[in-house]
Image (spheres, rainbow, N blue to C red):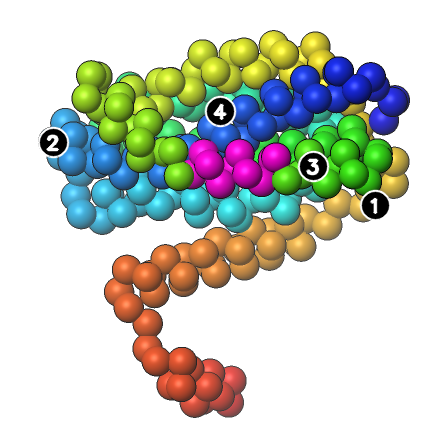
Amino acid sequence: MTPVSRTRRWAALATLCLAVSLIAIDGTVLHLAIPRLTEALQPTSTQILWIADIYGFVLGGLLITAGNAGDRFGRKRVLLIGVAAFGLASLATAYAPTAELLIVARAVLGVAGATIMPSTLSIIRNLFTDPRERTTAIGLWSSVTTAGAAAGPLLGGLLLDNFWWGSVFLINVPVMVVVLIVAALTLPESRNPDPGPLDLRSVLLSIVGVIGVIYAVKEAAHAGSPRPASWWPRCWAWAR
């Protein structure tokens, strides 16, 4: 990556933090909207679970793959594609007429979010070559991500007091337009000069493995998991 000025570095960091904050907000903003969403779309109990969880499943499952894509094809390019896709998917989610289409739109949101999150962190690592600046930048990135997840229900409640349930997703559109424009102007392009061959089988195994772990954790949280003392005998019996 070509060295950039201090002002441009911190302006780019602000843009990246704004993008990743929306990714975190979208993970929690739906919780308060579910009652109104249920009244409007009449989803089944299973569809409600998928509406709530599909975003996290897809986002977590594609993080490693999307990060590799950024290293190979250019982190700025992948980030801009993800930001544009996130804005369009947010628009589709806000106006989804049925529960099935809402689930699909939330899945697309997860795909777009997976391209944004690792790209922002990789760009920060390449923008800030000074160790002290890099530590500060990554700390700010982490803080904004955590704050975004915490602010999701608060923002959702504020919007639901004045608008319909789709407003919790529609708010993403103007913000992502700003991020898209500013990122295109301030971010330099970077990529891994030696990304190595693309192993499609490993990509598939990575996606299936990560999604499987996330699904297992969520199911354990919903239904309750057995005592840890009982895990080892069951695992040993399964292995034999």
195 horizontally vs 212: left or right? right
Q: Position of residue 168 (x, y in %)?
A: 31, 24
93 horizontally vs 36: left or right? right
Report crowding for label 2: few under 14, some 14 to 19, many 20 or more residues within 10 A (C-alpha).
few
First along the sequence among labels 3 and 4: 4
From the image, tell me which residue sits under label 1. 196
Question: In this picture, is 84 found above or below 128?
Answer: above
Magenta stretch contains residue 128: no
For the residue pair 120 and 203, the one nearer the viewer reads as 120
Determine which of the numbered discs, if any, sits on residue 39 in the image.
Answer: 2
Q: CA distance from mark 4 to mark 1?
A: 28 Å
Determine which of the numbered discs, if any, sits on residue 86 in the image.
Answer: 4
Q: Nearer the viewer, mark 3 or mark 4?
A: 3
Report crowding for label 4: few under 14, some 14 to 19, many 20 or more residues within 10 A (C-alpha).
many
82 horizontally vs 33: left or right? right
Name the residue at 36% across, 38% down. Answer: 28
Determine which of the numbered discs, if any, sits on residue 136 in the image.
Answer: 3
Check disc 2 and give the amino acid type: Glu
Check disc 4 and give the amino acid type: Phe
